[in-house]
Amino acid sequence: MKDLAQKLLCIISENLSLPPSYIQEAVGEVFQNITISYYSPCPQPDLALGLQSHSDMGAITLLIQDDVGGLEVLKDGMWIPVPALRDGILVILADQTEIITNGRYKSSVHRAVVNAEHARLSVATFYDPSKSRKICTAPACE
């Protein structure tokens, strides 16, 4: 997963006409965190929220999930369900990548909602900059 995250950050760098390793070098030594989330079925899903709306603070998040939907992304003031990708990896760009790219790549605001009938399981791998790292906008993005 770390190799995939690094490759994706290289692609973003190249797309912005930056050296391939620019974003990787900007975030420095990454702090990798893995969170496993289990959402129980909820008989009244309209009265509960699995995970409140937020954007991820790091550079990039890779999400593996089962086939039960529940992830939603905020777009133009509306919550849009994200199709479940049982055999795929969902890429979520995070706040530090938005800062480095000066908003050319956006951090997504998202949330998890519960399901009335089915439990949901997801595994998120977060790639965050070192806590002591100073993050700045890339000169080519100013």
Image (cartoon, rainbow, N blue to C red):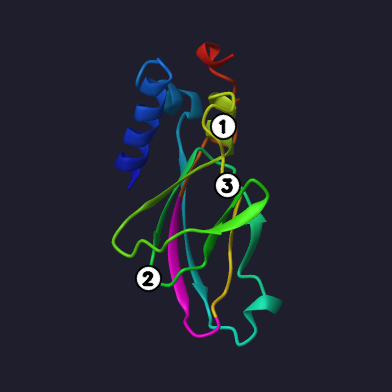
Distance of mark 3 from mark 1, alpha carbons?
11 Å
Residue occupying the point 68% across, 49% down: 77
User: Which labelled disc corresponds to residue 52?
Assistant: none
From what the image shows, is residue 44 above or below residue 88?
A: below
Quadrant of residue 65 within the rendered picture: bottom left
| Residue indicated by mark 1 | 98
Residue 120: % across, % down: 46, 74
Chain-order first, disc 3 or disc 2: 3
Residues drawn in magenta: 116-125
Q: Callout 3 environment at 10 Å: few (<14), some (14 to 19), or many (20+)?
A: some
Q: Is residue 21 visible?
A: no
Nearest the viewer among 99 and 132 is 99
Seen as rendered, the residue at the extreme right is 47
Residue occupying the point 53% across, 83% down: 41
Nearer mark to the viewer, of 1 and 2 = 2
Dot 1 amino acid type: Glu
| Residue indicated by mark 3 | 56
Q: Callout 2 environment at 10 Å: few (<14), some (14 to 19), or many (20+)?
A: some
Dot 3 amino acid type: Asp
Q: Quadrant of the C terminus?
A: top right
Dot 2 amino acid type: Asp
From what the image shows, is residue 119 above or below residue 80?
A: below
Nearest the viewer among 55 and 123 is 55
User: Which labelled disc corresponds to residue 67?
Assistant: 2
Quadrant of residue 98 within the rendered picture: top right
Badge 1 marks a residue whose secondary structure is: helix
Chain-order first, disc 1 or disc 2: 2
Residue 22: % across, % down: 42, 20
From what the image shows, is residue 140 above or below residue 128?
A: above
Q: Is residue 58 magenta?
A: no
